[in-house]
Amino acid sequence: MNPPIKAAGMNPRASIRLLWAILLTVLLVRLGTLGLYPIMDTSEARYAEIARKMLVSNDWITPMFDHDVPFWGKPPLSFWLQALSMKVLGINEFASRFSSWLLHVASCLLIVHLAARERSLQVGLTAAVIYSTCSLGFFASGAVLTDSALAFALLLAHLGLWRGLAHADRGWALLGFFGLGLGLLAKGPLALVLIALPTALWLALTGHWRRLLSLPWLPGIALMSAVALPWYGLAEQKTPGFLHYFIVGEHFSRYVISNWQGDLYGSAHAEPLAMIWVHLLGGLLPWAFFLPLLVKWRASLQGQREYVLFVLAWAVSTPLFFTMSTNILWTYVLPALPAWALLLADVVWRKVRTALITAVALALPVAGCAMLFSGKVDDRPQNQKTMVALWKAQQAAAPGDLIYPGSRSFSAQFYSSGWARHTRQLPRSENFYLVHRLGDQPLALPAYASCDLVGQANASEMYYCRVGPP
């Protein structure tokens, strides 16, 4: 570990204590708020509901999109972690998000470790603070996502790769292969692409191709395969057709075909070419305003050219890979954020006073808490927690199924323990509750039933429909 360095206006030991205090404060605030806002449609609620189904069905091989409908869109690592959290902590918002928070904390520790060995402890702590308080990092540390597992896996893989290439550290190199195995279980073959691209860039820039021979390829590949391949075999055996859809559809068609119509579980996200770079800037806010400082980073390299080129190759590889893709989400840049945090930390720590670092770091946590306590998050129409609570309150006096004839609501399914149904074939022999969300198509109440408005919340209306004579 490199010795402490002095930043503008602060004793090195005091600066380290301050950075630890900022980082721990942000992490604890995020932990304390995990259960203070409802599960939202669509992605977060969908993944939380898939994890809930996995737990209650005790089926740990095939994630389920709906009853008897397998979810082939993602491997199970994030669902395993979420389901295990629910098993220990109960089926609730806190438990569904807890694994993302744990992965984020583990990622911060890896970031601190890497930078402390190559630069200084202050740079490592500053990088962890930047990663935790940029908009996407702060959001992902408390959201139900699959990207958090991929980001952690690739961070571990990059760290192991660097230690193996730069220091011939066999133990860390094997941990890197283990990280790739986790990446295959988090998002699939994309993990291999997102580690191969920065590796090729770094080797091309440095010319150290012979260092590849120092990596423990045979035991590493064996370890990676042992971690990931058994599940792939079991998944294809249990639901034939999975491998074709997942490998060809999710890893080729999704990224090269705008408005891809083969998505079995949602809709394509058509965006302009190179939009991923805009998402990167948005994901780095408010720290994106310090990016111009990187232009003059050469003065701070101090003989660390290979390290900086490695981190730079890591930082640009993910957005480069998605530059020509139009079917993207802003969370796709999450695996690159640790690298951008490391680059920014190297210059922010030297060029920016600690008071400004503290203010920028606390901006999003303070704003997020203010939004939570204002109730604005609960008012979003994607939240169906209130409507499900209203439906539950009516069951004793007027039982009936909960039906969403418009767009599917995974939020309603999660809060109703799977009782909420998405169907346009309304019951004709039993009473039921009908929820119309104002963003859906206009609602036509069934002529064969007498429907009364029960309540309204979150831009949604609930009707109780009596079939036949009252």
Image (tube, helix red, strand yellow):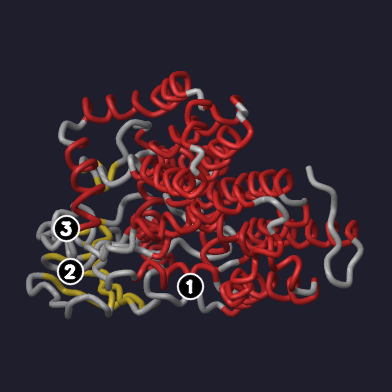
CB of mark 1 within 8 Å of CB of mark 2? no
Residue furthest to the left in view is 448
User: Residue 445 location, x and y as percent?
Assistant: 14, 75
- Which amino acid does the dot numbered 3 rest on? Glu
Position above or below: 234 against 185: above
Residue holding disc 3: 430
Q: Could you tell me which residue is drawn at 69 percent across and 61 percent down? A: 346
Residue at x-position 24% and y-position 62%: 403
**Residue drawn 80% across and 71% down?**
354
Provide the residue designation for mark 2. 470
Query: Mark 2 Cα within 10 Å, few/some/many (few <14, many 20+)?
Result: few
Q: Are marks 2 and 3 in contact (CB under 8 Å)?
A: no
Whether residue 368 is visible to the viewer of this picture, yes or no, is no
Element type at mark 3:
loop
Question: Where is 332 relative to 196, above or below?
Answer: below
Mark 1 or mark 2: which is in front?
Answer: 1
Labels 2, 3: front one = 3
Q: Is residue 280 left or right of residue 8?
A: left
Q: Kindly identify the amino acid type of the residue bearing the numbered disc 1.
A: Gly
Q: Nearer the viewer, residue 77 or 83?
A: 77
Q: Earlier in the sequence, mark 2 or mark 3?
A: 3
Q: Nearer the viewer, residue 25 or 410?
A: 25
Q: Which residue is mark 1?
A: 282
Label whose residue precedes the other's in the sequence (1 or 2):
1
Label 3: how many residues lie within 10 Å, few (<14), some (14-19) or many (20+)? some
16 to the left or right of 372 = right
Q: Quadrant of residue 447?
A: bottom left
